[in-house]
Image: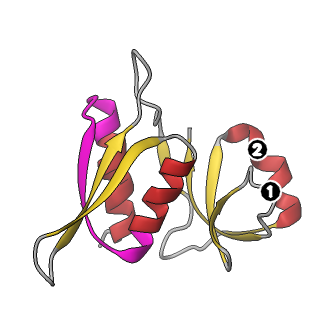
Amino acid sequence: MISSLANMLAHLKNCSRIKKNLVYIPYSKFKFNLALAFKKHGFVKRVSLLKYTIYRSEILIELASNKKHNMIQNIVQVSKPGQRIYWRRNQLKDKHYLGTYFLTTSNGIKTNLDPTCIGGEVVCRLV
């Protein structure tokens, strides 16, 4: 069974590869906050919440791009339902050259490049 986060990351990766700019993803609070974190760091241009009914909502994500290619080249899920990966503050400094890692912390979703990040569960890596 595939997790909803893995489904979101696969949608973003596939749409980035075929140079499609708009992505529709089923809504959840965590996925919406993760998309807002992507927007904050320049990987996504626009994030919107589309409510159709009380029970059905979607997230509209517009991918950011340069003249030739999208900003998201590769996206990898690090923590999986069977194996959770946690990093402390001192482990964040060693991983900064491999891409941008997004972590869930007690203060919200942060990246490894954020100086206020204290560590947490590693959600995904963007290159």
Q: Write the residue at 33% across / 69% down.
A: 4
Q: Position of residue 37 (x, y in %)?
A: 53, 57
Dot 2 corresponds to which residue? 96
Amino acid beneath label 2: His
Residue 89 sits in which quadrant?
A: bottom right
Magenta-highlighted residues? 15-31
Q: Write the residue at 11% across / 71% down.
A: 52
Element type at mark 2: helix
Q: Nearer the viewer, residue 106 or 90?
A: 106
Amino acid beneath label 1: Leu
User: So how many labels did they put on this image?
Assistant: 2
| Mark 1 Cα-neighbour bin, 10 Å: few <14, some 14–19, many ≥20 | some
Image-based side of 9 in relation to 114, left or right: left
Element type at mark 1: helix
Quadrant placement of the C terminus: top right
Q: Position of residue 27 (x, y in %)?
A: 28, 70
Looking at the image, residue 94 lies above or below residue 97: below
> What's the distance in space between the residues labelled 2 and 1, CA to CA?
7 Å
Looking at the image, residue 127 lies above or below residue 77: above
Are the two marked residues, 2 and 1, in contact with CB atoms closer than 8 angstroms? yes
Q: Write the residue at 36% across / 53% down.
A: 47
Looking at the image, residue 32 lies above or below residue 39: below
Dot 1 corresponds to which residue? 92
